[in-house]
Amino acid sequence: MMVTLSGLSERNEFSAVIIRTDFTDEAAWREMTAELERSSHYDGDPADSYDVVDAPELDGADTDAILAAISEPWGQLSVVFVADSTTMRADHHALLAVTTMTREDFDDDEDEDYEAMVEFGREFRTVPRGVHSIHANLELANMDFQDYSSSAHEDSEGVFRSFSSTAG
């Protein structure tokens, strides 16, 4: 089944994109978005620092299906964040961070770059307070996806939490 998401034609290019696929726990959703807003460094309304796309049709979808659904509508995003059933069930409400970059986005002579980027996979979990840092640093090319995925890989639960006590 091919799904194409819509709903971000008015997307703020500086906002993180949250794809909500699980709608089973409104209290958990509110807790997660409250943490997103508390951790925002945005000058205006913290709720404007992220855009939400409701996608119940992607409930249980794998990374390939998510990437296929977002390939057209929003131009080149570096990463999207998925609020799935794991997000809603876990105490830390960690979202799934998925790189939108595929092998096709790299030139033939850049195979090693792609392999390095996905050394720890094309996805990892991040606590809500990590979303803004990840999104901004990837969009500005200050850091690479593997910087975050390797940090998550080192965590006992496989979740990116921060690089230090002062990190975003």
Image (cartoon, rainbow, N blue to C red):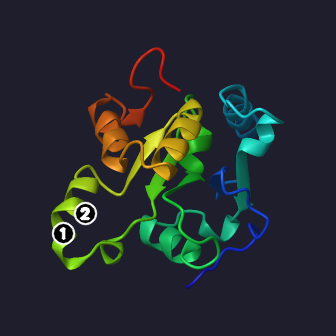
Counting from the top left corner in percent of width and height, residue 53 is at: 72, 61
| Res. 7 image quadrant | bottom right
Which labelled disc corresponds to residue 53? none
Q: Residues within 10 Å of mark 2 (few under 14, many from 20)?
A: some
Task: Name the secondary structure under disc 2.
Answer: helix
Counting from the top left corner in percent of width and height, residue 129 is at: 58, 30
Q: Are marks 1 and 2 in contact (CB under 8 Å)?
A: yes
Point 72% across, 41% down: residue: 29
Outermost bottom residue: 1
Counting from the top left corner in percent of width and height, residue 69 is at: 57, 75
Q: Residues within 10 Å of mark 1 (few under 14, many from 20)?
A: few
Amino acid type shown at disc 2: Tyr
Which labelled disc corresponds to residue 114? 2
Point 42% across, 42% down: residue: 142
Which labelled disc corresponds to residue 111? 1
Please state if 88 lies on the left or on the right of 160 as rendered.
right
Task: Name the secondary structure under disc 1.
Answer: helix
Amino acid type shown at disc 1: Asp
Please state if 19 lies on the left or on the right of 140 as rendered.
right
Which sits in the foreground, 18 or 165? 165
